[in-house]
Image: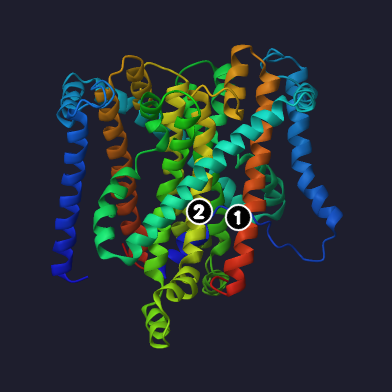
Amino acid sequence: MSTGERTRSLRRAAVTLLAAAAAYEAVARSGFFPPALLPTLPAVARALVATTMDGTMPAHAFHTLYRVLIGFSLAITVAVPLGILMARFRPVENFVLPLASALMPIPSLAWVPVFILWFGLGDTVSILIVFYAALFPMLLNTWSGVRAVNPLWLRAAGAMGADEKALFWKVMIPGAFPFLITGARQAFLRCWIAVVGAEMIAASNWGLGWVIFDAKEFLNTDVMLASLVVIGAIGFAVERLLFGSLERATVLRWGMVRAATT
Amino acid sequence: MPDALQAASAQNTLEFAPSAGAESGWRVIARTAFPFLVVGALWELVARFGTFPARLFPPLEDIASAFVRLSVSGILPHHALDTLIRLSAGFALAAMVGVAIGFAMGRSRLAEDICLPLVSIGAPIPGIAYAPLFLLWFGLGNVSAVLLVAFVSCFPIIFNTWTGVKAVRDIWVRSAQAMGADDRRLFRHVILPGALPYMLTGLRLGLAQAWRILVGVEMLAAVPWGLGWLIFGAREFLNTDIMLAGVAVIAIIGLALEKLVFQRLEAFTVVRWGMMR
């Protein structure tokens, strides 16, 4: 894409967004829908600023992120070693794979009521739901990543006198890394959906999902839209900035995959 | 092609590792059943020893009897049917809208410039977060649930159709045109088959996403029937056996969707045309 075309695209994108915002604003102001259901954009911006200033929105975001972080780390600690074991040892694979394929199609949100009964309302439920949501993408990607390591590399390294430990750390892990990153990305996207849903259903006073659901009761549509913006922004930031830079720092630099054409 | 890798790992299909080959069917069945037996036995042990109250952690035969009782009385099939109808209505809507928008974006520069910013802003927000908003706008019940499912599964379909249409090689289009293909035939014989692998990936991701969201939406939207509602409602009465029977049905439907719908579809079209090995 030439630079001229690029600026034209950017200009058109800006025009589209402005037009969409103007159309929304016009509908909101026309009074066709009650303003409680369709707040104007300045009202949403005001709600966003107000809740950020008094510290509630950051606190909600913090709680949500905390749950995601704990659940996600737990999932990685379980899934990566298990995936590697599955790929290396046939009996482990034979044991885990049928269970995983039976559990995987169950949406994590289906477990929320069951977990509420077992563990009570609160953090535990959300963390476990996040764990469940992240576990399977991570497990499957680790498993296929380790299996996809080119056997030629292993034999070459072996021929050059690498011992088991060096093989593992220097060949297998870097070889499987593109899959691990893909797995972590997918896992994060699923967690991010699951945590919002879990917070809505397992009400717990804090959390971005809970804010949206709670604001519905009081028809605070502006707060709902403001937290939607925050949820989207955090998801986007983690996906693009965190995983994007992780990918650039590891697999792209090692030359494992060519830069994605975006 | 960098996204070949992504596609390979993104599909989350489980094909059992091709083992030694000469293994008999019985052995495979036994091997697959074994882990379930172990987990079942463990569950049974924990349930029997009464570490947890039986109301919260029912033994397997309670779950099985709840399953049978509710199936025979027609309650469970009714719930499952309503969920499936909602899923197919939402998904059909998403497939039509998503493929249409994706094609428009892929073929026309103007449509791409207009739609891409809107789609890339809408996509990263988890669909379930819109649920309360949809409930306010469209009321409790079916309309909200179906619209939300459609909205959520739209995005992967749009993105993948768009990528697929863009990935059709210029040279195919040009050689078809040089051989005198009109627009309709160009579309039907070149662009559609060329974009189909991506489109199918998009449809499959969309369906998977719709499925994951739907159960949660049913809990929130207070629909009268539906598996999500069944599980959520059973919690009020501490009917853990019914809840777990509901979860089992959800697992069966999810597995069937994956195995029967998409793997078949893919085998029939894309693999046959040699677009994908």
Q: Is residue A94 left or right of residue A257?
A: right
User: x%, y% of residue B232?
Assistant: 57, 21
Q: Is residue B196 visible?
A: yes
Residue at x 47% of width, y 68% of height: B192
| Type of amino acid at the residue the image marks with label 1 | Phe
Question: Are the two marked residues, 1 and 2, in contact with CB atoms closer than 8 angstroms?
Answer: yes
Disc 1/disc 2 C-alpha distance (Å): 9 Å
Quickly name the residue at label 2.
Answer: B203
Check residue B262 in the rendering and tell me which mark sits there, or answer none: 1
Residue B100 in the figure: left or right of residue A51? right
Q: The residue marked by circle 2 belongs to what chain?
A: B
Quick one: SS at disc 2?
Answer: helix
User: Does residue A169 appear in this view?
Assistant: no
User: Which quadrant of the rendered structure holds the C terminus of chain A?
Assistant: bottom left
Residue at image point 50% right, 65% down: B196
In the displayed structure image, the side of residue B97 where residue B215 appears, left or right: right
Of mark 1 and mark 2, the one earlier in the sequence is 2
Are the numbered discs 1 and 2 placed on the same chain, yes or no? yes
Q: Which kind of residue does numbered mark 2 sit on?
A: Leu
**Mark seen at residue A67:** none
What's the coloring here?
Answer: rainbow
